[in-house]
Every structure is written in C-alpha cells, then in structure tokens.
Image (cartoon, rainbow, N blue to C red):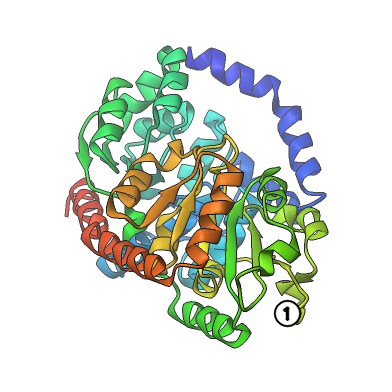
C-alpha cells in the first residue's frame, strides 16, 4: 500500500510545484528554500540534534514550552524546528529567533526524508499534534530515529478519515515510538488506529504563557481608547462577513452605551489581510489612528495575538462560526479574555468543553447569536469578571503537560 501511495506522490509532483508557485504570489515565503522540500539542505548542524516538527502557526506556538524545556535539558544539543507553511516558518523565526535551526520538512518522498535524516541526524523526532505521514514514519523507523507524537489530538472526524485508509495509516501509527495524547478521548481514538505506548499528558497549550509586554500594551491601548472593544480572533474565509453583518447598525449600537463599539478583526492567515481590509477603516500594520468614528480595525500583524487579547473586552474565536473545527481558545483564556465560541469546535473539543464547564466561555449556535452574546457581555462587567477569573483558574489547573512530555523524551533518548 505504501508503494502505491509513493507512486501517487510522484505522479502529483507537478501539482506540488505549481501549488508552491501559486501560493507564492501572495506569500513569497512559499518560493523560498524550495530545495528543502525535497531534502536538500545547506544548514550547518551540531553533532547531536533533536528535531521538532510544527506544521504551521498554531503548532509552532504550542511547541514553545516543550522547546524551552528541551533547550534547558539538552544544552549540548542543537534543536531543529521544521514546518510546512510559509506562515509557520515566519512564526518560528519570531518565537525562537536564532536559538534554533529552522527548515522546511520535505514532502513525504522516501528519498527526500532519507536525505533529511542523513543531513541532520536527529536522535529524536517530535511531531506536533497530528503530523503522521506514512513514509516519514517508516523511513525514521528504518534509520532508528524514534518518533514521538506530541500534544496529540484526534477528532472523531479525523479518525474516520484515517480508518478509510487503514492499510496505509495503521502501520504509520503503530510505528510511532510513543504518543502523548491531550485527552483520554484522543488516546482512545489513536489506539483504535494502531498507536501504542500512549500516555495522556494534557495539552501543551495550557503551558504557553502570553507575551507579557504585548499583553500590557494591549491593555494600555484599550484603556486609552475608553471604548468597548470586541475582538474577532483568528477568523477564517467567509467568517468575517458573517460576523460583521450580524452587528447592529451604528445608530442602534450607540443606544444604551456611553461610547461606540470598536471591532478588531484578526484573520487567521496573513495572506488574507488585504482581502479582509475592505471591511476596515484602519490597519494596525500602518499604525492608523483609531478615532471616534473608526468602527472596524484590522489586526494585520504577525505574532501579536497577546496584544489583541489584552486589548479586547470580549473575544469571539474564529474558525468556529464556519465548519472548519475552530481555533485555539486557550490563548484567549490565558490572556484574561472572556470567550464566545461558535458551534464548530471539533479541533479543540476538549478545551472547549473544559472552558464551557468552567464558565470561562460561552457557545453560540451561529454568527448572529455569537454577536448578540458578545454585545450582552460588553454591557455586563460582572459577567466578564467572572469569566476572566474562571479562565485563569482553568489554565492554572491544567498546566504541567510540558513536564510529562519531557519525561517521555528522556525515556526515548535513554537518559
């Protein structure tokens, strides 16, 4: 089965190249370092390396506590962080700077993976969340490189997809050296796909600390404006229109309020910044002033989510009002933002359930209901205060996943 899969990959190679060129029109990073995607590297490496793969922005940020812990544990090792997306690579540079090596992970061709391993010679590979590729896992096993699936999550929807390709997926999951699952449900679904050596270690995202200076800057910005601020965080395609169309007209908005509502929109993907700009009267990237007439403000900067969460009174979490499974709400809770989330949350099902049960978040059935709930919260300081406190307690009570991950890494490294 894996041979047929590899043959298929070879047949669609022209599509991969065309896709890089096409995406590079809006994100030039896709046209950089293309040779790395086929296993050709010039990076100098240390004699001892540990490799962490974080496919894109969310995984790159979620890996931060584990990266810092491994740097402390293994000062004589080099740390290699790989990604797949251009935005992920930019995030790795922003978060880790020159403290790590950064590269693209090759496409899942056996010869490219072999070249990658021969160049970097990692003692351990850590795949963040769901990045299990058949040839990647098989070639690592052939080369004696243990793979840990870290912060692993597996929704029922994803599990059904893997089961349809069981002949390909099961050998890959079975070959993993260890799995650190976010929840018991994730562990059960991963086991059903063939994974072994599974431990429920919790979610690394609860260990991620908001960037303190950004958080304080956002709070100061909000205080200076003295306006109620609603954040539409990490929105996906089509979602901005749904949410903004659900807002009341400006004259209705002012009724019963001392100051006019300001809405900040932060799209999930930077390539959509210019597209979403059509809704906004100001952009943070241009440092546009926020006067009393400005209603919609575009958060079009990378690496500043702590600022935006600090700046808002209420946050609606994107990706949950369109059917794509939601975005990370833990970052908002850790920053002290009351959260409203939509119905599509399968990518963050456990975190959402915990937040709802704790009273740190509210769930709405659609965009209109989400806006109504957010506007109600904006007028209820007591409710917002209770939600902020509940979010802080929830995050504090679920920290510790990093230590449990490090213990598994130590075991795989035979330390």
- Quadrant where the image shows the C terminus: bottom left
Residue sitting farthest toward the front: 256
- 184 on left or right of 46: left
* Rendering coords of residue 6 (x, y %): 57, 20
SS under mark 1: loop
Category of crowding for the residue at label 1, using alpha-carbon neighbours closer than 10 angstroms: few (below 14), some (14–19), many (at least 20): some
Tell me if 158 is positioned left or right of 50 in this view: right
Residue on which the image places disc 1: 290
Q: Residue at (60%, 38%) from the top-left corner?
A: 322
List x then y, in percent, for residue 216.
48, 82
Query: Considering depth in this image, is 356 or 158 the residue closer to the camera?
Result: 356
Q: In this view, does 329 lie to the left or right of 106?
A: left
Q: How many labels does the image show?
A: 1
Using the image as rendered, state which of residue 224 and residue 129 is in the foreground: 224
Residue 173 picture quarter: top left
The residue depicted at 43 percent of the width and 33 percent of the height is 132
Foreground of the two, 335 or 172: 335
Above-or-below relation of 290 to 308 = below
Placement of 381 over or under 7, stated as above or below: below
The relative height of residue 185 versus residue 404 in the rendered view (above or below) is above
Q: Is residue 55 visible?
A: yes
Residue 131 locus on image (x, y percent)? 45, 38
Residue 338's spot in the image, x, y percent? 43, 62
């Amino acid at each position: 089965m894996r041979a047929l899969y590899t043959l298929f990959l070879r047949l669609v190679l022209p599509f991969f190249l065309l896709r890089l060129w096409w995406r590079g029109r809006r994100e030039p990073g896709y046209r950089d370092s293309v040779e790395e995607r086929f296993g050709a590297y010039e990076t100098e490496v240390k004699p001892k390396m540990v490799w962490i793969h974080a496919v894109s922005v969310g995984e790159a940020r979620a890996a931060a506590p584990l990266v810092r812990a491994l740097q402390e544990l293994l000062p004589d090792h080099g740390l290699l962080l790989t990604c797949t997306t251009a935005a992920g690579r930019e995030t790795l540079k922003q978060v880790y700077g020159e403290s790590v090596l950064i590269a693209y992970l090759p496409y899942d061709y056996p010869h490219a993976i072999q070249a990658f391993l021969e160049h970097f010679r990692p003692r351990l590979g850590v795949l963040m969340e769901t990045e299990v590729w058949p040839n990647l896992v098989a070639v690592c096993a052939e080369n004696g490189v243990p793979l840990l699936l870290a912060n692993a999550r597996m929704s029922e929807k994803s599990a059904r997809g893997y089961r349809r390709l069981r002949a390909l997926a099961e050998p890959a999951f079975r070959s993993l050296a260890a799995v650190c699952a976010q929840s018991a449900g994730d562990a059960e679904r991963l086991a059903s796909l063939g994974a072994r050596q599974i431990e429920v270690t919790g979610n690394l995202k609860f260990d991620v600390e908001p960037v303190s200076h950004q958080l304080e800057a956002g709070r100061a910005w909000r205080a200076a404006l003295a306006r109620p601020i609603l954040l539409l965080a990490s929105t996906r395609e089509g979602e901005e229109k749904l949410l903004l169309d659900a807002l009341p007209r400006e004259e209705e908005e002012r009724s019963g309020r001392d100051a006019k509502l300001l809405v900040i929109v932060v799209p999930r993907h930077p390539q959509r910044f210019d597209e979403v700009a059509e809704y906004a009267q100001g952009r943070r990237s241009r440092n546009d002033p926020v006067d009393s007439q400005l209603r919609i403000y575009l958060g079009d900067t990378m690496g500043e989510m702590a600022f935006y969460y600090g700046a808002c009174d209420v946050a609606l979490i994107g990706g949950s009002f369109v059917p794509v499974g939601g975005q990370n709400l833990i970052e908002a809770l850790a920053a002290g933002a009351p959260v409203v989330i939509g119905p599509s949350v399968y990518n963050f099902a456990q975190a959402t359930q915990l937040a709802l049960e704790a009273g740190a978040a509210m769930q709405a059935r659609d965009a209109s209901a989400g806006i109504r709930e957010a506007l109600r919260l904006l007028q209820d300081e007591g409710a917002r205060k209770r939600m902020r406190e509940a979010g802080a307690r929830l995050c504090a009570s679920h920290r510790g996943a990093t230590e449990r991950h490090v213990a598994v890494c130590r075991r795989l490294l035979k330390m």
